[in-house]
Amino acid sequence: MPGTRQRRTRGEGERLRAELVAAAIDLLLEPQPLPAPSLRAIARACGVAPSAVYMHFASQDALNYAVIAELFGRLRADLDAADPEAASPAERLDALLGAYLTWAENHPGAYQLLFERPDPLDTEGEGPGLDLLDRLARLLPDADPQVPGTDPQARHATALRIWCAVHGVASLRIHKPSAPWAATARADARALVAGLAGLPAGT
């Protein structure tokens, strides 16, 4: 009869379970984009019909890009507010990284949307938020005497390594809050970045 499940022979259930797990792993070989709130969910939150959203955004991608641009704007504003412009480059870099970690801690969902999903643009090197890399690189020549001030490629390579290290701290703090963290996020970031940018590794 249609819909009637046949009894499996001994051992087939275990094999099927293994096949299901293997198939799920195969599907995870490619990056899985973090889903942004749907147009319908956002319409419900605003108390309007979904058609009203389409009056301002032609597609889900268009709304996503507007959200990402706004969030990067808010992150930049927090970084600006924390930047002691009269201080040394090393002090400014330390303050910048501290503000970045604080923003991630206070806005974990927004942080995931900005830094844990593929950029919405396919144009190489023009993804939103990459100006943060330039911001880091500009502080490096004086902060790290080993980085030649006349070599922007070397500065950007070092800045990208610093970003990778600090992102690791921010992301793991979000996803693994029960890990045996022995220090603050800022202290962990300082320890990782110390060898890259000449920052003190103390707390």
Image (cartoon, grey):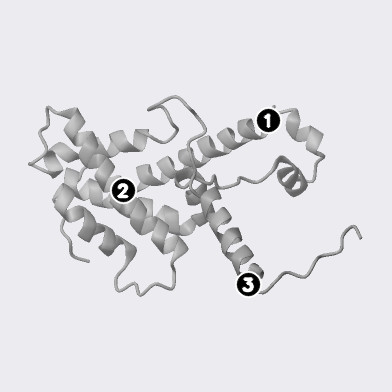
Q: Position of residue 62 (x, y in %)?
A: 62, 30
Q: Is residue 36 left or right of residue 104?
A: right
Q: Position of residue 201 (x, y in %)?
A: 17, 61
Q: Position of residue 99 (x, y in %)?
A: 35, 52
**Circle nearer the N terminus (3, 2):** 3
**Separation of disc 1 and disc 3 at Cα?**
48 Å
Q: Is residue 160 left or right of residue 100?
A: left
Q: Residue at 25% of width from left, 45% of height from top?
A: 161
For disc 1, the marked residue is 59
Secondary structure of the residue carrying numbered label 3:
loop
Q: Is residue 144 visible?
A: yes
Quadrant including the N terminus: bottom right
Q: Is residue 180 above or below residue 155?
A: below
Q: Is residue 122 above or below residue 112?
A: above
**Separation of disc 1 and disc 2 at Cα?**
32 Å
Q: Is residue 162 above or below residue 150?
A: below
Type of amino acid at the residue the image marks with label 3: Gly
For disc 3, the marked residue is 11
Q: Is residue 174 above or below residue 61?
A: below
Q: Is residue 85 visible?
A: no
Choose between 31 and 175: the one closer to the eye: 31
Instruction: Point out which mark residue 164 bears.
Output: 2
Type of amino acid at the residue the image marks with label 2: Cys
Asked if the residue under mark 2 is in contact with the one under mark 1, i.e. CB atoms within 8 Å, the reply is no
Disc 2 residue crowd, few under 14, some 14–19, many 20+, Cα 10 Å: few
- In the picture as drawn, the residue positioned furthest to the right comes out as 1
Secondary structure of the residue carrying numbered label 1:
loop
